[in-house]
Amino acid sequence: MNRSYLLIPVLLLVSAPVSGQSASTESQTLQELLAEVRQLRHDLQTATVATQKAQILLHRVDAEESVVRVMQERVDTTRSALAQIRFDQKSRADTIKQIEDKQGSDNTPPGEQKDLEGALAQIKARYEAHANDEQEAQAKLTDAEEQLRVEQAKLSGLEDQLDQLEKSLENPNHGRQ
């Protein structure tokens, strides 16, 4: 029986650390779970912010693409107008040369000479009146092209930001280590 009495205190001493280890392990597991929940919450907040940034950037890109389209149309319209002005002026210059050549010809009857002089005066007046149109159209074209380049640069910058955001979303552990 002596042995039985000795066995009880030994069992009590041995069982005490085992129950203490169990509580310590549970506490550590709970701390790890809590840390993981906090990290998940942080990741969710980061993802939400990234999503909002992406939506804002997409709207800005859409708006800037619209501006670029309008500016491109303006450049195209101005180029067409300039080409038309140049064509009209060249046509007037060719007509002036033809009339002057015809006037210098000895075969032109005097009545037709008077008509040619009147036509020549009108065409020269139109030519001179439209002489500044080409310079004005060229200035408008230069301005439109510059504005187009500025808007294209803005669009490119927004697209770069979107690419960077996309890369950061592809690699969510990049900032965490």
Image (cartoon, rainbow, N blue to C red):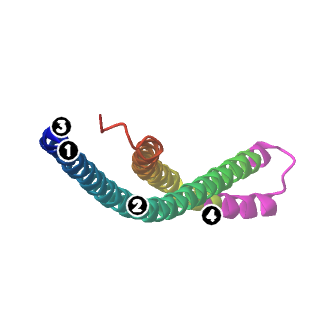
Q: Please say if the residues under marks 3 and 1 sit with CB atoms less than 8 Å apart.
A: no
In 3D space, how far apart are the residues under numbered discs 4 and 3 (Cα atoms)? 138 Å
Q: Residue furthest front?
A: 1
Q: Which residue is mark 4?
A: 122
Q: Residue at x 55, y 56 (%)?
A: 72
> Residue 177 at what x, y percent from top left?
29, 34
In 3D space, how far apart are the residues under numbered discs 2 and 3 (Cα atoms)? 72 Å
**Secondary structure beneath label 1:** helix
Q: Which residue is mark 1?
A: 15
Q: Which residue is mark 2?
A: 51
User: Looking at this view, is 117 or 137 the one in front?
Assistant: 137
Q: Earlier in the sequence, mark 4 or mark 3?
A: 3
Which label lies toward us, 3 or 1? Answer: 3
Characterize the local packing of mark 2: few (<14), some (14-19) or many (20 or more) Cα atoms within 10 angstroms: some
Left or right of 50, for residue 99: right
Q: Is residue 106 magenta?
A: yes
Left or right of 126, for residue 164: left
Residue flagged by tag 1: what amino acid is it?
Answer: Ser
Q: Earlier in the sequence, mark 4 or mark 1?
A: 1
Q: Residue at x 40, y 61 (%)?
A: 51
Residue flagged by tag 3: what amino acid is it?
Answer: Arg
> Residue 68 at what x, y percent from top left?
50, 57
Characterize the local packing of mark 1: few (<14), some (14-19) or many (20 or more) Cα atoms within 10 angstroms: few
> Residue 78 at what x, y percent from top left?
55, 57
Magenta highlight range: 101-121
In 3D space, how far apart are the residues under numbered discs 3 and 1 (Cα atoms)? 18 Å
Q: Earlier in the sequence, mark 2 or mark 4?
A: 2
**Secondary structure beneath label 2:** helix
